[in-house]
Image (cartoon, coloured by chain):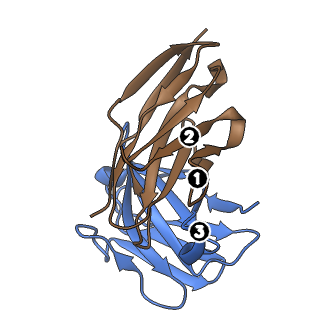
Amino acid sequence: AQSVAQPEDQVNVAEGNPLTVKCTYSVSGNPYLFWYVQYPNRGLQFLLKYITGDNLVKGSYGFEAEFNKSQTSFHLKKPSALVSDSALYFCAVNGGANNLFFGTGTRLTVIP
Amino acid sequence: GAVVSQHPSWVICKSGTSVKIECRSLDFQATTMFWYRQFPKQSLMLMATSNEGSKATYEQGVEKDKFLINHASLTLSTLTVTSAHPEDSSFYICSASRDWTNTGELFFGEGSRLTVL
């Protein structure tokens, strides 16, 4: 069965510092992996995805993620955090079923 | 880009009334749409898969008579919360895919906040 784990409920980082939001997955077959961001009382906004190809995927707003098959991870990263990056981040996987399975979310707070 | 619109964004209703939430794909056709429910500080819980021209597929534990889903066209799915009660208060989000089989990518609506008094 497909599953996604986001081990950190909360991540705090100082503005200007690099940030990492962790995600590990479990699927049968080749995974499609996604990161979404959610601002308060809003829907989810697509950040980036990995389907195939280069393990390092670049997405919106300067975010990137690295697919690591051996560690079954897809951590979200950004070299320099902005206060406006503060939001709720969801990792998701589509393991072949007709839906996305979401992690529990990680709240990122960027401290000025 | 693909745009999914939800309406209304906010709705307040009295207990016992029914509320309809619309989900539209504005610039693409969506044979499949998904409805989620999100509780405070929690992840998205899939409620049902809405299929154009056929009955919705509900997840285990979701009352199909309570949450009526209609997908009458390739650009519109509706969720009707019937005889709403305070415990139905939640944030409801829809999503749609342009090419699910090949991309597995979903586009999300802005969500609808339902408050039942």
The image quadrant of residue B76 is bottom right
Mark before the other along the chain sequence, 2 or 1: 1
SS at mark 3?
helix
Could you tell me how far apart the alpha carbons at marks 2 and 3 are, in whole angstroms? 18 Å
How many neighbours does mark 2 have within 10 angstroms: few (below 14), some (14-19), or many (20 or more)? many
Q: Quadrant of the N terminus of chain A?
A: bottom left
| Residue B58 at x, y percent in the picture | 33, 75
x 61%, y 27%: residue: A85
In this figure, which residue is indicated by the disc labeled 1? A49
Callout 3 touching callout 1 (CB < 8 Å): no
Q: Which is more foreground, mark 2 or mark 3?
A: 2
Look at label 1 and name its amino acid: Lys
SS at mark 1?
strand
x 71%, y 61%: residue: B3
Hue used for the chain lettered A: brown
- Picture disc at residue A65: 2
SS at mark 2?
strand
Could you tell me how far apart the alpha carbons at marks 3 and 1 are, in whole angstroms? 10 Å
Look at label 2 and name its amino acid: Ala
Q: Is residue A30 above or below residue A10?
A: below
Q: Are marks 3 and 1 on the same chain?
A: no
In this figure, which residue is indicated by the disc labeled 3? B103
| Residue B3 shows in the view | yes
The image quadrant of residue B5 is bottom right
How many neighbours does mark 1 have within 10 angstroms: few (below 14), some (14-19), or many (20 or more)? many
Q: Which chain is blue?
A: B
